[in-house]
Image (cartoon, grey):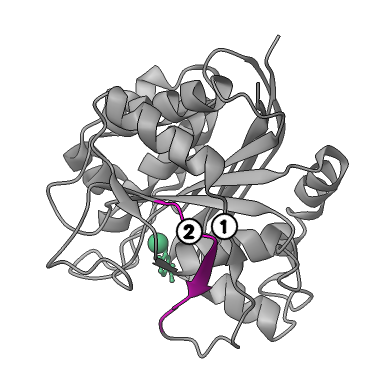
Amino acid sequence: MAKILGGIATSHIPAIGMAMDKQLEQTPYWKAFFESYPPIREWLNAQAPDIAIIFYNDHGLEFFHDKKPTFAIGAAPEYHNADEGWGIQPIPPVTGETELSWHIINELIAAEFDITVCQEMRVDHGLTVPLTLMWPGHQYGHVKVIPIAINCERHPMPTPARCFKLGQAVGAAVHSYTGSEKVIIMGTGGLSHQLDGERAGFINKPFDLYCMDKIVHEPEALTRLSIHDLVREAGAQGVELNMWLAMRGALEGGVLTELHRSYHLPISNTGAGVQLLAMNEG
Ligand code: DHB
Ligand code: FE
């Protein structure tokens, strides 16, 4: 049985990738933000996961508004970065994973999650910035990644409850896999932010802190929210909380210990959060 070690949720703001590439971590703007990450890196190095299942959203690079799967999963040997803006340096490809990925695909379809299967897929900052945060210097090549994209760009979007259930189904699939791999689950994006329109720049700190509280032991409080609740409370892009909920769903059935939590505001336009939940499968 493959083992789930725990889950990590983190914002994936593109400016973080730029700051790391330009080595701005110690500058006044970034220092406190980057100080949140070493404890998580230490935990990862000690746990040595083989596979990272990453719930993220594709911001229009691979799936534009004309063709937008609600849920999509990668089953490719390798993923290339195709990020926008910022002039990020070319970065090494992300190592893929296919065996567990196909097992998850089969289990998800059997569980009535009609996910789009991608044997080729470009990935953007929603996936590569968190990987680089966990393994600085783009040293993530040893970890096999299974990307799972959730539509947060065009309405209609899947509900928080549905994303939580997707995570539960992914967690169940990992538990029914006969391999002995160690797996971490990541959820990227959020917390509150709105990048355009009349409320551009909107951030809701009390709501973000509420979400970080509830996600640990009472995620049901968040799964009762609608997409419109999320847009109102967390801004149009605050819907990215859905990836945190999918991550949390995959940790159902174990005993969770919150090992780390940080929140900084603003980073670029966003309330930036990071949280580490270790799982004891009992
Ligand atoms: C920002 C945040 C995001 O989640 C994103 O995808 C793009 C930009 C920002 O705050 O700049
Ligand atoms: Fe985003």
Magenta stretch, residue numbers:
74-84
Marking on residue 96 = 1
- In percent of width and height, residue 68 lies at 19, 58
Ligand 2 quarter of the rendering: bottom left
Q: Is residue 242 left or right of residue 80?
A: left
**Is residue 186 among what the camera can see?**
no
Where residue 37 sits, quadrant-wise, is bottom right
Q: Find numbered disc 1 in the image and state the secondary structure of the residue it sits on.
A: loop
Q: Is residue 116 left or right of residue 14?
A: left
Amino acid on which disc 1 is placed: Gly
- In percent of width and height, residue 232 lies at 22, 45
Where residue 161 sits, quadrant-wise, is top left
- Image quarter hosting the N terminus: top right
User: Residue placed at 56% from the left, 66% from the top?
Assistant: 128
**Residue 181 versus residue 235: which sits nearer the camera?**
181
- Image quarter hosting the C terminus: top right
Marking on residue 76 = 2
Q: Is residue 40 left or right of residue 127?
A: right
Q: Find numbered disc 2 in the image and state the secondary structure of the residue it sits on.
A: loop
